[in-house]
Image: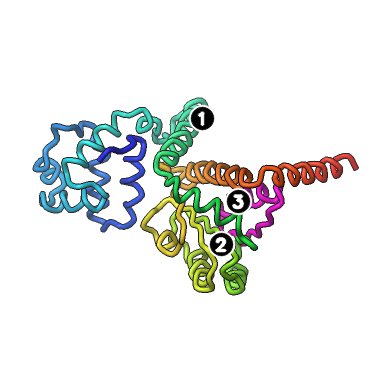
Amino acid sequence: MKQDLRAIGAQIRMRLPQLTPLERKVVESITSKNDFSEQTSLKEVAAENAVSEAMIVKLAKKLNFTGFREFRTSLTYYNNSDVANLHSEIGPDDSSEELLEKVFRTSIQAIEETKAILDISEFNRAADIVFKARHIDLYGVGGSASVARDLSHKLLKIGIKAMVHDDAHIMMMSAAILNDDDVAIAISHSGMTRTVVDPIRLAARNGAKVIAITNYAESTLAKEAHVVLNSTSQGSHLLGENAASRIAQLNILDALFVAIAKKDLKKAALNLNKTQQAVKNLREY
């Protein structure tokens, strides 16, 4: 299987929530093993984690590899790649310069790996769906709502109106009146937030097209959506995954905005001039 090296770490992380606690512990043990290499044997890994060799093989397959050998080769290559070494854990004694370096490098890693895993056909489908939509609703809570507002703001610049909802009741009310001419875009890092998943289910039942932006390809949200655009990030214990994930999601949606604008550049440019002039007039009032 030929694969972009930058996607391997993301491929593993994206499937962690679907593993049992023991399986997750074993994966985290293997991925943090500094001397893991092509010479590391299946027997050695099983013994170090006090599990059977059969479990390690099964685990490799659950992570979407053909078996332990492909998992070992892929992880070894990834560990030696530049992108894998961008992330460093934040420490209590880090200077301001070290903090800046680590936070920026983690965000760069998130962008690089997200680009590597992004499905171009899904991206193109998302652009087509949004461009043709009669009405667009954006769902997200917390930091995801901020990402949703950023996309809504950009779309409005080119004449496309999109409503952002971050309240559970309003999201359900919105989903209840969507139909097959409409689009619901849901943004959730975990893809498991019930506040977002429930209205998405309702919107889909009513015929609306559902686009999901999430870190986990096997999440409930991803399974309910018609189109899934995956982001990924490693994050840190202090910042969590969400901080770097939002950077990656903003980049996905920036690209999506440009792809939508390209479908009718003349109209987009006309509306962009109108909205910019309106803001300029407000500033000069």
Can residue 44 be found in the magenta stretch?
no
Of the numbered discs 3 and 2, the one sitting upstream in the chain is 3
Residue 255 percent across, percent down from the top left = 55, 42
Tell me whether circle 1 and circle 3 mark residues in contact (CB < 8 Å): no
Please state which amino acid type lies under the numbered disc 1. Leu
When asked about the image quadrant of residue 254, the answer is top right
Residue highlighted by disc 2 = 184
Residue at mark 3? 146
Q: Is residue 215 left or right of residue 207?
A: left
Q: Indicate the quadrant containing the C terminus: top left, top right, bottom left or bottom right.
A: top right
**Residue farthest toward the top in the current orientation of the protein:** 97
Rendered location of residue 111, percent (x, y) = 47, 37
Which residue is found at the position 68% from the left and 53% from the top? 160
Q: Nearer the viewer, residue 83 or 202?
A: 202
Residue 20 position, x and y percent, is: 26, 58
Number of other residues with Cα within 10 Å of mark 2, as a class: few under 14, some 14 to 19, many 20 or more = many
Which residue bears the numbered disc 1? 100
Instruction: Give the distance between the C-alpha atoms of the residues marked 3 and 2, in whole angstroms.
Output: 16 Å
Count of numbered circles on the image: 3
Question: How is the rendered protein coloured?
Answer: rainbow
Q: CA distance from mark 1 to mark 3?
A: 23 Å
From the viewer's perspective, is residue 282 above or below residue 19? Answer: above
Q: Residue at x 27, y 52 (%)?
A: 24
Task: Please identify the quarter of the rendering in which residue 273 is found.
Answer: top right
What amino acid type is highlighted by mark number 2? Ala
Which label's residue is closer to the chain start, 1 or 2? 1
- Extent of the magenta region: 138-165
